[in-house]
Structure formats: C-alpha cells, structure tokens
Amino acid sequence: MADALSVIPASVLRNLSDKLYEKRKNAALEVEGIVKQLTTAGDHDKITAVINLLTTEFTYSPQANHRKGGLIGLAAATVGLTSEAAQHLEQIVPPVLNSFSDQDSRVRYYACEALYNIAKVVRGDFIIFFNQIFDALCKLSADSDANVQSAAHLLDRLVKDIVTESDQFSIEEFIPLLRERMNVLNPYVRQFLVGWITVLDSVPDIDMLGFLPDFLDGLFNMLSDSSHEIRQQADSALSEFLQEIKNSPSVDYGRMAEILVQRAASPDEFTRLTAITWINEFVKLGGTSLFPIMLIFWERFYPAYLIKKRKLEWLLVKPMKSFVPLRLIQLKDLTLEQSSPLQGVRLHVVELLEMQLSSEWEATRIEALHWISNLLNRHRAKVLTFLNKYLTPFWKHFQILLIRSMHNENLIAQRHIEQHLCGYLMLRVWIYVQVVLLVLEVHACIAQDPQHFRQLVVFLVHNFRVDNSLLEKRGALIIRRLCVLLDAERVYRELSTILEGESDLDFASIMVQALNLILLTSSELSELRDLLKHSLVNPSGKDLFVSLYASWCHSPMAIISLCLLAQTYQHASTVVQSLVEEDINVKFLVQLDKLIRLLETPIFAYLRLQLLEPGRHVWLLKALYGLLMLLPQQSAAFKILRTRLKTVPLYSFNGEQIRRTSSGNPYQILHHMPGGSQITEDGDINQDSKNSHNGINFASRLQQFEQMQQQHRQHVKVQAQSHRNSTSSSTPKDVQRPEELSRTSSSDVNRPPSRSRRATGQLQL
C-alpha cells in the first residue's frame, strides 16, 4: 500500500473518487501513465501494489463513486500494462466481475465498460475467465437498467469475437454451464443463450453437434416462447443443427429421440410440428435402431395428437407427407422374421393399426391405411399371416369408410352456397377421396391372391347394389383405381362373371352401363381398349370380348358400344336390327345419346377414319345408320350423327354408287359385291369369313343377347303389373288417361336428353 501511495499522487487518488465523471476520467489517464512507466521499468511489484490499492480502497469501497473510480482505474492500469497485462489478470478481473452484481446500476454499467477495455487489451488471455464472464453476462442480459443491458451487449459481442478466434476455449467446460441455463424463462436470457449457441456452432473447431443432446430440450422449449423473435431464432438454430445431423456420419440419435418423443406431445403446435419433423428425419437416418422409441411415441401420443387437431386447416401447415408420424418408420429395413427381437413389437403395430381404422378422425384413418399398405407391399406374406384374423374387420372398415365419405361429402354439397367455406370444403372432399383410395390400395394388396380378389370384387358389387349413390358418386373412382392396382383385364373379367348371374336385373343393367362408360372413357383402361380393338385377330382380345359379352347383354347400348370398340361391325348392325319396340325407351335413348357424343371423342378416332373407306367398312356404315334411325330427328344426337355421316365420301360398287337422294335422305348402301366376294365381319373385302370371326360364334352371341333382353322385358312387365296393382286403389284424379300418357311418352322420347340430368346409375367421371 505504501509503495502505491508513493507512486500515485494524493490528488490523483482524490480525483479518482470524485463524483464528476470528467475528473475520474482524467485521474484514470494519470494512472495509465504511471503504470506504463512502471511497466517500462519492469517494476511489477509496484504495479501489483497499485492494482491492490485500486481494488481494496476503491472497487470494494462502500462509496459508489469510489467503486466507479476503482473500475475505471483498473481498466486504465490494464491499458498501461499493454502486453504485460496477462500476468496481472488474476488481480484485475475478479473485482470487475464482482461489480456486475453491484446494487448501483451505474457501477454495473462501469463494470461492463471496464471489462470491455480490459478484454480489448488482453484478447485471448481473457479465456481463462470465460465461464465467470459468461455467467455474469447472462445475468446482465436481463438487467433492469436499459443502459446496463446496452453495455452488456457490446461486451458480449467482443467476447464472442475473442472466443471464435481463440484456441484456448474449452467447450467441455462450457456445456454444463449452458445446460443449467437453457430452461430459464426470461426472454432476454433466452435470446442471449441462443445467440451463443449459434456463434459457437459456427466455429469449425468447436463440435457443438456432439453436445446437442445437452441443450436440445432447451431449444425446443424456446419454440413456445411468447416472443416471435425468440421463436424464430430458436427455430433457425434447430434447422441448422438438423442440417448438420443429415451431413454427419455419426450422431447419437437415441438421446435426442427421447427428447423429441416428449416434445411431440407438447401443447404448443409449433413445437409439436418441429419435433415431428425431426423425428421424421431421424428415422430416415437412424433406421431400425429407433423403432422402439417411435413405437412409444405412436402408442402414447399419436391418437391424442391427431384428435386435438379438429381444425382441418392444420393439414395446410405443411404437406402431410413430410411429417405425419405413422409414415416415419422406413419399412424397407424392417423385417418380420420370427427370429427378430422386435417381432413382438411389430405384431403390436398391426393391432394398433386395426384400432386406428375405427377412428372418427380422417387423418388418423388415412395414416393407418398408409401403414398397412406399406407393410403389405414390403412384407406381404408375413403380414397376411398376422392379418388373417383382421380381414373381416377390414371389410367392415372398408364399407364404413366408403359410406362415411359419401355421407360427409353430401353434407358438404348442401353447404356449397357458403362461398367463404369453398376452400375448406374442397379440402374435406380431397380427404374423403384419399380415404377411399387408401382403402382400395390396402385391399388391392390383400387381393393379389385369387381367393381374396374374388372376395373383394363380390364385396364391391354388393355395396354398389345396396347403395346406388355409392355407385353413382364413387363408382368410377373405385373401379378405375382397382384397375390400376390389380390389372384392368382381371378386374373387368371378374366383374363380368359376377354380373352375368346377377338376379337383380335393374342393378345389373345400371352396373354394366357404368362399367361400359368407364371402359370407353378412362385413361387407365386404354390398354384394355386396345386389346378389344383386335378381338377379330387376337386370341386374347377374342377371349376378353366373349368374357365381357355375357354380362354386357344386360344393356343393349353397352353391347353396341362393345361391338363398335371391338370392330365387330356386322354384329353391331345385327344387334341394332334385333331391337324391338320395348327396348327403345327413354333410358335407351339417353344411353344412345351418350354413345353418339363419345363417337366424336379421340377414343373413337380410328372408327371415324374407317369411314374414309366405306367400301371396306360397309357394316360400320349400316350400324351407324341403324343408330341414326333409332334417334328422334329433333334430338341433338341425331344431328351430330347425321352431320358425321354426311361427310362419308362417295363410293361406287359395280357401276352404282353410294349416293345421296335428292331429298337429302341418308346414303343408300349396296350389299352385293362383284365376283362373288364376301363382306367379312368388319367390312373388309376378300377375306376368309372363318378367319375374320377368329372363333367367335356370333350367332350364339346374338341368341344370348336376345335371351337376356327377353328376361329384361319380362322383368319390366312384371314390375309394371305390380305397379298397376299397387295403384289400382288410387282416385281417378291420380290416374293419367291413356291419350295423355301417350302424349307424355311421345314428348319424352322426342325431347333431346338434358345435360343437367343424369340417368339412374350414371357415374361422375
């Protein structure tokens, strides 16, 4: 002390404790000059005495002005020491750190200023006090005084710069300190901690990823902070770590997965979504090692997780494929071998899936179906052995899901006038469609076996029979999807076999018309159409034609369409000629109207091009003229077909030509060919009729068609008689006079079919 007093004049010490900042500043400059002289002389004993004097008499003084002067004096002494400051840091830094907790905010402010100046001088030597400094800065970041906070931020930036360029920093010693503070709720402290995590993670020589489990939970905790800025910073830090995990060859997934499973059940939505996104990536990277943990997540939290989300807009937050839990486990690496230690766990998965199919929430059912589908695709034989007892519930769930989707969509249709709900309703419809498609996908996987395939098709036909609205609303979607999943030819052959013996003739007719429309219009059935086009020259096409013919007999228009598609034009013409009065009703004309319009689509482009050679395709012309004669002249379909036939080029046979009469009537067709040549089934000349038939007995087919149509006519008569008997007790006022009925029927036949009305059983494509 005496040495220090002999070195520093009393006036300097007096000014150092003055209440005026300027006097303290000038006194500090005097101290800096004195210490600089002692440093040059190498008199470190006196330097030590000066520092002790500033510490004991000033920084620990009960007087606030003395403490302020001591802090500025220590900073000045450090500046005077320059390169020699490192050996005196243990004397200089502790009293400054002690001042960070001073009750006077101005003292805390000067402590930040003093430490800032000290750090600028010593730089890397400063690291030995890092943990103490970090702890002090953590507290000051939440200081009640704005000036102290500002000063602490400046000091914090300088310390970060020093740490990033230093090779003496110990991450192992720092992590416990960081972990202790990660659950602090103060927003300023959270911002401070996230800033340090981000800075340290950016240093190449510091492996923050290896210590991520120590502070991962704290980062996720910050995602639910009330401050948007803190949530954004925490999310940015987590995104950066997730990217590093993807690029890292070795990561401890286990510890972090446990944290994520807990956070996936967080009441905060943003936290849940982020946790599930992480789990999704972890499973892709970690594979089967994470299966037990994911099963715990699924069983404990998944059902409640989805049930909480009643608002459908939740599905718009992120694409479902990117984060839905039930798709998280990568099934390609899972096995269902009996020797697998996880075999029992996977059996439990199957049971959980069956339970989730009964959920009232669409998202739950969709993801359960995704899982079942993936399991069947990858381990079909094994899974089927486990699912045998669940097949009956699956059929039940299949029917429930289809009916429920129909019911819900009908409710939506009733509310379409609420324009502000348009987007919401469209999304709901999309979900119902997804449920139907996924159910079909699951059952298609099961139905690869002939037994299950037959069961599925019979089940579908049964549901279409008992619920006409299902056939009308979802029939096209279901049939087309099954054709993609199970082979179109196989599906159509099986449907035809079932419908051939269908006892409900009205349903059989509607179903055949629906199947025929799908066959003629769906892109999924293009290969099937190509096969039918070669029925006369291809054995496979012939077998398919004969297979479909038996059930298509339920509908005259379906048979005519099938013949036109198969290019069996002579038989088509014969079928048209065989129609009797009872067959030409309103339903028939509606179906004929649809066919005429389909003839103008690209699907029948080949048929229209064949009209360029009327000599080779006489039976095609005759079939089309036959259809034209069946149409009412005032109908739109009549005008469309007549316009098309008028474009057929003229052709002469043996000096006579197909010509238009002066009255504008259709062309007259001559059937006798010169030289004894014979017109074959498709109208080609000079071909052997036996080869052209390709083994198809058209006489027998025609007889089959006529017998089926006779059954339909008899069925109609029985229904009409039953209807008359049931209405015989009606009053005369309710009965229509015969002449009125005749007038009504005539007007209905001649009226062009309205586009706004659908015949019974018509599908929405």
Image (spheres, rainbow, N blue to C red):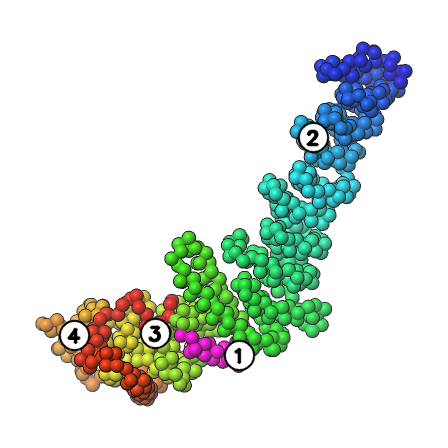
Disc 4 or 3, which lies upstream in sequence?
Answer: 4
Query: Where in the figure is residue 302, as x and y percent of width and height?
Result: 62, 61
Could you tell me residue 433's position as x and y percent? 46, 65
Alpha-carbon span between mark 4 and mark 1? 54 Å
Tag of residue 343: none
| Mark sitting earlier along the chain (3/2) | 2
Q: Which residue is mark 2?
A: 152
Q: Can you say which quadrant of the picture contains the N terminus?
A: top right
Q: Name the front one of labels 2 and 4.
A: 2
Question: Circle 4: is it few (<14), some (14-19), or many (20+) Cα within 10 Å?
Answer: some
Region rendered in magenta = 445-468
**Residues tagged 3 and 2 counted as in contact (Cβ below 8 A):** no
Whole-Å distance between the Cαs marked 3 and 1?
30 Å
Q: Residue furthest left?
A: 662
- Residue 667 is marked as 4
- Which element carries disc 1, helix, strand or loop? helix
Q: Work out whether mark 2 precedes mark 1 in sequence or the reverse, and give the earlier one.
A: 2
Which residue is painted at 43% across and 82% down in the image?
A: 498
Query: Which residue has dot 3 on it?
Result: 760
Left or right: 477 in relation to 194: left
**Which is nearer the eye, 694 or 169?**
169
Q: What's the residue at 38%, 67% (across, down)?
A: 765
Q: Which residue is mark 1?
A: 452
Q: Amino acid at mark 4?
A: Tyr
By secondary structure, the bulk of the magenta-drawn segment is best described as helix
Q: Earlier in the sequence, mark 2 or mark 4?
A: 2
Looking at the rendered structure, the kind of residue marked 1 is His
Mark 2: few/some/many CA within 10 Å (<14, 14-19, 20+):
many
Q: Can residue 425 be spotted in the picture?
A: yes
Is 110 left, or right, of 40 in this rendering? left
- Amino acid marked by disc 3: Thr
